[in-house]
Amino acid sequence: MTRLDASDLANRLGREAEAVCRYYLGAGHRQGNYWQVGDARNTPGRSMFVRLKATAKGPAGKWTDAATGEHGDLLDVIRESCGLIDFADVVAEARTFLSLPRPEPALEKKKRSSTPAPSGSAEAARRLFAMSQPIGGTSVEAYLRNRGITALHGTGNLRFHPRCYYRPDDHGPTETWPAMIAAVTDLKGGITGAHRTWLAPDGSDKAPIETQRKAMGDLLGHAVRFGIASEVMAVGEGIESVLSARQAIPHMAMAAALSAAHLAAILFPETLRRLYIVGDNDPAGDSARDSLVERANTAGIEAIVLSPVLEDFNEDLRRLGIDALRANLRVQLTPPDVARFWLKAA
C-alpha cells in the first residue's frame, strides 16, 4: 500500500469522525451533527465543535474552538489529546486507530516540510507543556491531594495531560496515561525542560508502569519552581517532597530538582542570602546535599538543611499530619524567617 499523506489520513479519520471523537475526546458528547467538548486536549466543556458529517460548511472532522478561535482536523485532535510532539508519532497513532499497515521503512523516513522538535529536547519539552492544561479538577490535583498536598497556590509550573505517551522501551508498544507535566525553568523563568509523572486515571496513585517518571530537555542547574525567590528560598529533590514542606511554609519560594545530581548543581539567584535544603533520610542523597551546602557557603549564602522525622517530608505529612510537620519545620527555621514566613502563614 502506498504511503498516505497527511491530507489523505485526515480524510480517512473524517470518515470515522464520531468514533475518533469518542476515543480521543471522551470528555465530550454528540450534539446534533457535531461533537462538543472543551478543547482539543479533551477538557470537559462546550466551546469546541467537531463536524461529524460533511456538509456545505466543510468536510467531516474539521473543528473550531469558539473560545480561542483555534481550528484544525482530527490529526490535530490526536496530537493535542495524546500530547505528541513528533508528526511521525501522530501518524503512527492515527494508523493504529485506523488499523492501517505501516508504510515502507524507506518511505517512512521521508522528511516533512515542518521540522519536528528533536526528541527529548528543550523545545520538545516546551511543546509538551503548551499542550497540557491547568491541574484544577484533574487527576493531577487528585494525585497531589491523595498525598496530602492541598496548598496548590503558585503551582502554575504543574500541568495535566490526559493522554501522555509512554514508551516502556524502544520496541515495546506505546501506551497513553494521564500525566503530571512539570515545567523545568531557569532563573529567569524560561522553560528548559519538562518532567512527566504518569498517573492512574483516577489520580489515586502513579500509573502501574515500570518507569513512572521521566524528564526531558536541559535540566542541569534548573528546577521546577514554586514562587519567586528573593533573599530566602528552599530547594529539595523531588516535587512531592518540596510541595509537602511548602504545606507548612506556604509563602516561602521553593524549587524542586529532579535528582540528587541536579540538586547538587542547582543555580542560585543573585539575590539569595539564605538557602534551606529540603532533605530526606536517604544516604544516597547525602553527597548531593553536602556538595550543595559547600557551593552555597562558597557563594556567601547561608545553607540550612531541613530534616524530616521519617523518610521524607511527604511521608511526614501523610503519616504524622500537618501539625506535626509544621512543628518540626518551625524549630529548624532561623528566628527572622519564623517572623517573616511563619507568622505570615498563621
Image: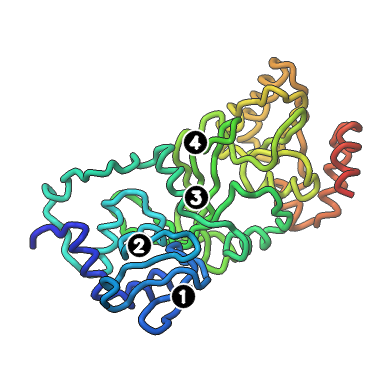
Counting from the top left corner in percent of width and height, residue 130 is at 47, 49
Q: Earlier in the sequence, mark 1 or mark 3?
A: 1
In the rendered image, residue 39, in percent from the top left (x then y), is placed at: 46, 65
Q: Which mark is residue 281?
A: none
Q: Amino acid at mark 2?
A: Ile
Label 3 SS: strand
Amino acid tagged 4:
Thr
Q: Which amino acid type corresponds to the residue marked 3 in the rendered image?
A: Arg
Write down the residue under mark 2: 78
Label 1 with label 3: CB-CB less than 8 Å: no
The mark lying in front, picked from 1 and 3, is 1
Give how far apart the Cα atoms at labels 1 and 2 are.
15 Å
Quick one: label 1, few (<14), some, or many (20+) residues within 10 Å?
many
Q: 146 or 8: which is nearer to us?
A: 8
Q: Is residue 31 left or right of residue 313?
A: left
Q: What is the C-alpha distance between the residues marked 4 and 2?
A: 25 Å
Q: Are marks 1 and 2 in contact (CB under 8 Å)?
A: no
Instruction: Specify the label residue 192 is tagged with.
Output: 4
Quadrant of the rendered structure where residue 237 is?
A: top right
Task: List the residue tagged with mark 1.
Answer: 28
In the rendered image, which residue does mark 3 sit on? 196
